[in-house]
Image: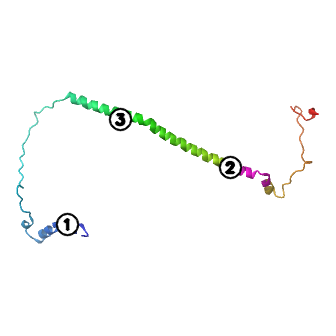
Amino acid sequence: MTSLAALFDWLAAGKAAQRARVGGSQAGSRLRALPKEEIHLYVKVVDNSRVVRIVDKRDWVQTIGATCTALTVTVLAIALLLPGGYNLLMSRRVEMLKAQREARINTLRELRSEEAALLNPAQLQIWGGDKFVTPTAASVIFAPPPGGAVASLKAQR
């Protein structure tokens, strides 16, 4: 039974077709009559041209009432579920924004620590190498305050 044709042969459908091709009689492949097998049909022609449809107003009102009720219930259900769904979406959005904020704060902290490590005086010595010389106290020149200075060291003596 490796194919559909083999299945049909097994069910004897192929044998009848083979007998018909070979030239066997079709009377041998017909089934015998079963009791009460005859079906008699009687077809009566009905003329509905003079039939008038009666409109039932109560049925029309009930149909409109049921439709309006279903529509009202649907709108109310949507109106009741809409705020909860909106709150659910917005709470998810707020949590996502909080997570983004925490990630950016952590990135800022990392960048600040890298900046502090780069601006460390020991790091300046490494960058400057032999060219950078720490100035002595005698070589520092303090600029005198301008003429209209608000505070002066000379006034306190």
Of callouts 3 and 1, the N-terminal one: 1
Residue 50, quarter of picture: top left
Residue at x 74%, y 52% (from the top left corner): 118
Residue 50 vs residue 134, the one in the foreground: 134
Residue type pointed to by label 1: Phe
User: Is 40 placed left or right of 95 in the picture?
Assistant: left
Q: Which residue is mark 1?
A: 8
Asked if the stretch drawn in magenta spans residue 119, the answer is yes
Q: Residue at x 28, y 32 (%)?
A: 66
Horizontal placement of 12 versus 62: left or right?
left
Q: Are marks 3 and 1 in contact (CB under 8 Å)?
A: no
| Region in magenta | 112-123
Judging depth in this view, the residue of 69 and 41 nearest the camera is: 69
Where disc 1 sits, the SS reads helix
Q: Could you tell me how far apart the alpha carbons at marks 2 and 1 are, in whole angstroms?
A: 79 Å
In this rendering, position of residue 153 left or right of residue 78: right
Residue drawn at the location 23% of the way across and 30% of the way down: 60
Q: Residues within 10 Å of mark 3 (few under 14, many from 20)?
A: few
Say few, some or many: other residues with alpha carbon within 10 Å of mark 2 (under 14 / 14 to 19 / 20 or more).
few
Q: What's under tag 3, amino acid-wise?
A: Thr
Q: Which residue is mark 2?
A: 111
Where residue 74 sits in the image (x, y, percent)?
A: 35, 35
Which numbered disc covers residue 74?
3
Disc 3 to disc 1, how far (Cα)? Answer: 54 Å
Label 2 sits on what residue type? Leu
